[in-house]
Amino acid sequence: MHKAYAVIPTYNEAKNIGPLIAELLEAAPGLQVVVVDEKSSDGTGPLARMMQTQHPEFVQVVHSHLALGLKEAYLAGFRLAIAQGATHLLTMDADFSHPPALVPALIEAGETTDLVIASRYEKASRIRNWRLFPRLRNARLNSFAKKRFAKLKRIEIADCLSNFRCYSREVLEKISFEALSTDGAALQVELLRLVSDLGGSIKEVPFDFDASRQDPAKLAGRHVKEARQAIARILS
């Protein structure tokens, strides 16, 4: 019997967080949702707490008065979930670019796989409403990571940067969270490498990626150089 947790970092997601949680709980009955709010100023925190009040057995909220960054938000959620007996830990965005309807399939695939990646670049995947320059930046950085990862590990991964994932508890328990050295986009690549280094199994599944509500500043040009340098270091 699995016990799956979805760890969702949020920053100014007031428009999305309530509907997202509602759709998750409908799509995946029994799913535990952990919202890690990173000092939102638009009321995301109170709305998440309201959902927690309405669904106390399924929703938890972790607050911070600091801008945590993706790594610290993930780790806060991972530690809480593992302490509560999670068997599967999902990561996803709060902007609906990651469809809640796919969560049951990720969990099911995770029954036999240590890391399941919802891949935007699988042949059966669809990409909608992704503006040209953000799409090109992501594709180029992903191609860089993909080639270096394949050369190092001799494993072909189509989407190294996707953060719509399902990890097994067993593989995360083997990772030293304190030793993680990256953040943002590079963190996905570092976790991918660590799972592979540990001999964990990895699988990709296609999905319909809709970027219509994604923050246009996500993976902005000023962050690409930093991410590329970090990826080069961890895949050397």
Image (cartoon, helix red, strand yellow):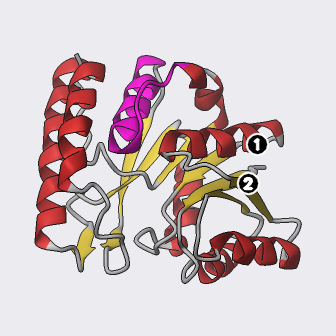
**Is residue 165 part of the magenta span, yes or no?**
no
User: Nearer the observer, disc 1 or disc 2?
Assistant: 2
Q: Residue 226 carries which label?
A: none
Q: How many labels does the image show?
A: 2
Closer-to-camera residue (167/222): 222
Q: Name the residue under label 1.
A: 80
Q: Distance between the residues labelled 1 and 2?
A: 9 Å
> Taking the image as drawn, is residue 176 in sight?
no
Residue displayed at 24% across by 56% down: 220
Tell which circle, 1 or 2, labels the residue nearer the N-terminal end: 2
Residue displayed at 14% across by 33% down: 147
- The percent coordinates of residue 155 (x first, y second) are 25, 29
Name the element at disc 2.
strand
Residue displayed at 38% across by 30% down: 190
Q: In this view, does 168 lie above or below 98?
A: above
Q: Three-letter amino acid code at disc 2?
A: Val
**The image quarter in which residue 187 lies:** top left
In the image, 225: left or right of 109?
left
- The percent coordinates of residue 119 (x first, y second) are 32, 55
Quadrant assignment for the C terminus = top left
Q: Three-letter amino acid code at disc 1?
A: Leu
Tell me whether circle 1 and circle 2 mark residues in contact (CB < 8 Å).
Answer: yes
> Taking the image as drawn, is residue 74 in sight?
yes
- The percent coordinates of residue 92 (x first, y second) are 51, 59
**The image quarter in which residue 189 lies:** top left
Magenta highlight range: 179-198
Q: In this view, does 185 lie above or below 175?
A: below
Residue displayed at 28% across by 60% down: 120
How many other residues sit within 10 Å of disc 2, few (<14), some (14-19) or many (≥20)?
some
In the image, 100: left or right of 146?
right
Name the element at disc 1.
helix
Q: Mark 2 points at which residue?
A: 62
